[in-house]
Image (spheres, rainbow, N blue to C red):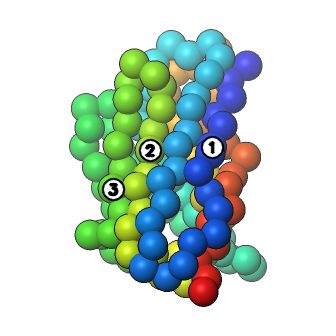
Amino acid sequence: QVQLVESGGGLVQPGGSLRLSCVASGIIFSINDMGWYRQHPGKERELVATISNSYSTNYADSVKGRFIISRDNAKNTVYLQMHSLKPEDTAVYYCNAYGRFVSGSTHWGQGTQVTVSS
């Protein structure tokens, strides 16, 4: 089995910062890409940022310059540092990992709520 567990969500005021973490565990042969996605109520899940195993990054236009994705390959962990948060960043944030696992090639975390409100 493979599990992705997110942490770090919560309530923050506009302009504040949060750091999300996601740890992958289980029988993992290799992880290529890791990423963060988010889902607003009533809308489809959307990409926030991805990072390859060679540390190449990709960001949604809406978060460029405010969010930073990073990873620790030795710990199978991906992070999302979020700055200058806006109310529209409020969503459930999901971690994703793509690679070679004991089962399947793509796995998702259970999601963590981020709420930006005064």
Q: Position of residue 24 (x, y in %)?
A: 58, 28
Q: Is residue 10 above or below residue 104?
A: below
Quadrant hosting residue 13: bottom right
What residue is rendered at 35% in x and 43% in y? 70
Mark closer to the chain start, 1 or 3: 1
Per the image, label 1 sits on a secondary structure element best described as: strand
Q: Position of residue 113 (x, y in %)?
A: 68, 62
Q: Is residue 68 above or below residue 61?
A: above
Quadrant hosting residue 53: top left
On the image, numbered disc 3 is attached to which residue? 68
Q: Position of residue 98 (x, y in %)?
A: 50, 34
Which label sits on residue 79?
Answer: 2
Q: Mark 2 Cα within 10 Å, few/some/many (few <14, many 20+)?
A: many
Q: Is residue 11 above or below residue 118?
A: above
Q: Nearer the viewer, residue 35 or 102?
A: 35
Instruction: Kindly tell me whether residue 118 is visible in this rendering.
Output: yes
Per the image, label 2 sits on a secondary structure element best described as: strand
What residue is rendered at 73% in x and 19% in y? 1
Residue type indicated by callout 1:
Glu
Label 1 and label 3: CA atoms lie apart by 16 Å
Which label sits on residue 20?
Answer: none
Q: Is residue 102 above or below residue 21?
A: above
Mark closer to the chain start, 2 or 3: 3
Q: Position of residue 116 (x, y in %)?
A: 58, 77
Per the image, label 3 sits on a secondary structure element best described as: strand
Residue type indicated by callout 3:
Ile
Mark closer to the chain start, 1 or 2: 1
On the image, numbered disc 1 is attached to which residue? 6
